[in-house]
């Protein structure tokens, strides 16, 4: 029997969205990188948490515009890394709905920001949209096809004119429910 391999790099990204008012969400993302490999890299010691970063976006509904940003770096490899926190305020005023990824890349790509915080922001955008769909749906169980079509063409399941989209446009709630995957009852 061979020894179990030691991971070289482990990244965990977690997200949490909460409704903070009738018109706002806060989405907090956390990125943690661990380096279990027992060798140093560029002077960064191994066997420890290399990055532990949190970013909170406050987002207004229904336009999904970022109204506030806060971030922390509890672990980072270099003292210079915290210089990337201030520029995150440039997210304020951006809409998470359309062109968000491009706008983030223009503001924080390469030497303009932190690759890890940028990855976290990118991962947060779909969480904002999905959470807003739940938080502000009112009494609706099924999305309103006249106003809630942001998720069309975001994946193959919700492709335009595919089975889900067609049933939504037809307001066929039983047909939509028939396509739901079985759910596990425990985590």
Image (cartoon, rainbow, N blue to C red):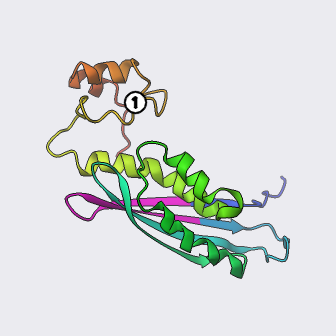
Position of 154 relative to 39 (above/below): above
Tag 1 residue: 152
Q: Using the rendered view, name the quadrant where residue 28 is placed.
A: bottom left
| Residue 22 seen in the current view | yes
Is residue 28 part of the magenta span, yes or no? yes
User: Which portion, as a residue range, is magenta?
Assistant: 13-31
Examine the image and state in which quarter residue 104 appears. Answer: bottom right
127 above or below 176? below
Magenta segment, prevailing SS (helix, strand or loop): strand
Query: Which residue is rendered at x = 63% and y = 62% of the image?
Result: 116
Residue placed most toward the observer, 177 or 23: 23
Q: Nearer the viewer, residue 170 or 178?
A: 170
Q: Position of residue 125 (x, y in %)?
A: 46, 50
Residue drawn at x 48%, y 68% is 89
Q: Residue furthest bottom?
A: 79
Q: Residues within 10 Å of mark 1 (few under 14, many from 20)?
A: some
Q: Secondary structure at mark 1?
A: loop
Q: Whole-percent x and y of residue 97?
A: 40, 44
Q: Is residue 186 visible?
A: no
Residue 84 locus on image (x, y percent) = 61, 71
Left or right of 22, for residue 133: right
- Horizontal side of 38 relative to 60 (left or right) equals right
Is residue 124 found inside the magenta-colored segment of the image? no
């Amino acid at each position: 029997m061979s020894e179990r391999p030691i991971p070289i790099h482990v990244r965990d990204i977690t997200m949490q969205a909460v409704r903070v008012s009738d018109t706002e969400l806060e989405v907090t993302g956390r990125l943690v990188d661990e380096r279990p490999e027992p060798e140093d890299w560029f002077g960064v010691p191994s066997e420890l948490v290399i990055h532990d970063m949190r970013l909170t976006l406050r987002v207004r509904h229904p336009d999904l515009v970022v109204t506030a940003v806060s971030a922390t770096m509890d672990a980072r490899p270099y003292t210079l890394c915290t210089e990337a926190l201030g520029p995150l305020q440039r997210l304020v005023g951006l809409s998470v709905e359309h062109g968000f990824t491009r706008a983030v890349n223009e503001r924080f790509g390469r030497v303009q920001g932190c690759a890890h915080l940028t990855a976290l922001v990118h991962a947060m955008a779909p969480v904002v949209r999905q959470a807003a769909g739940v938080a502000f749906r009112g009494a609706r169980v099924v999305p309103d096809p006249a106003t809630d079509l942001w998720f069309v063409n975001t994946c193959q399941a919700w492709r335009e004119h595919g089975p889900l989209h067609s049933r939504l446009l037809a307001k066929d709630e039983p047909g939509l429910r028939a396509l739901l995957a079985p759910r596990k009852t425990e985590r």
